[in-house]
Amino acid sequence: MKQPLDPKLLQAFVLLVETGSVSETARKVGRTQPAVTLQIQRLETAVNAKLFTMVGRKFVLTSEGELLLGYARTILSLQNEVHLRLSAPKLSGKVILGIPDLYAAGLLPDILSAFFAAFPNVEVEVRSRLSGVLLSQVQKNEIDLALVTGMRAFPDGEVVAEEQLVWVAADMKPEFNGGVLPLALLPPGNVFRDIALEALQTTGRQWKVVLVSEGMAGLQAAVISGSAVSVIAKCAVTPGMRVLGRAESFPLLSKVQLVLHRAGGRTNAAADALGDLITSHFAGSRVDPMAHKGRTQAGSGSF
């Protein structure tokens, strides 16, 4: 009978895929670079397959590596879930989680469902603000966690996923084919707005901001009423909206990073558990998990 795969080897493998760096993987697992290299070699021996090839200085997964990656993430996610469930009776208290409301409705249901199933005695307070506000609060230890848009001004934090930005208009409403394009956007200085306007500039299309809102409700009202086009995260598309693309002469938009920040000056086991669950949720999901983790992208936005 073959020996079971060592979870520590799988963890090193997944982190190397995500970081693309032996040194960063070593830092995250608390080992030396030679030790991490040895772990990968031991894993390749255990599965009797080459997991990486080198293209220049870049690690590229082989077909066997691609196959193992899915299983490794599932195994590690299940292992984390077992720990969460077994520790559930011991954990209570309160967690304050900050997340912009343009993400909350699309991302939180599955996360909260799993968390409350594991920790029924923990109270969660959700604060929905712009990312810049939430980052300030987590840095001041006023909240425990912030799941926000990655911004260059705040390079720290764990990149857990990517979210595609999309143009949206009202479903079953006339097309915005000619004239000045009416836009409903977040306030000046945020990533979503910057990406949208930069994309429009490449088309030469005329536009006018007709509504500004800090939250989803205002943007949703403008879009569904047929008054404007907006840019939101794909996870936030709701009934009454349709996604616009190149067929309607709208440029493709880039993705944004979702970054988890943890308060450094708060000791809260319940917050640690929720943060770990958020990380494992995205690692185990197929909804734009990060192919690699790194610093946050360019942009100084506040969403």
Image (tube, grey):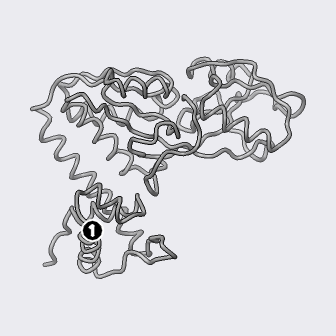
Residue 168 image position (x, y, % from top left):
68, 33
Screen quadrant of the C terminus: top right
The residue depicted at 21 percent of the width and 25 percent of the height is 122
Q: Quadrant of residue 1?
A: bottom left
Please give the residue where the numbered disc 1 appears in the rendered image.
36
**Quarter residue 126 falls in:** top left
**Left or right, residue 143 beside residue 42:** right
Furthest residue to the left?
A: 90
Residue 136 lies, with reference to residue 191, above or below; the image says: above
Q: Residue furthest right?
A: 179
Q: How many marks?
A: 1
Residue sitting at 46 percent across and 48 percent down? Answer: 295
Instruction: From the viewer's perspective, tell me whether residue 185 is left or right of residue 115.
Output: right
Image coords of residue 271 (percent x, y): 25, 31
Q: Quadrant of residue 182?
A: top right
Residue at 34% from the left image edge and 30% from the top image edge: 145
Q: Say if 224 sits above or below 293 in the image.
A: above
Q: Nearer the viewer, residue 31 or 122?
A: 31
Q: Residues within 10 Å of mark 1 (few under 14, many from 20)?
A: many
The residue lying toward the viewer, choosing from 15 and 45, is 15
Q: Secondary structure at mark 1?
A: helix
Q: Nearer the viewer, residue 136 or 176?
A: 136
Q: Would you place residue 182 above or below residue 250 in this image?
A: above
Q: Amino acid at mark 1?
A: Val
Q: Position of residue 89 (x, y in %)?
A: 10, 32
Which residue is at a point 29% across and 77% down the rendered structure image?
A: 44
Q: Position of residue 35 (x, y in %)?
A: 23, 70
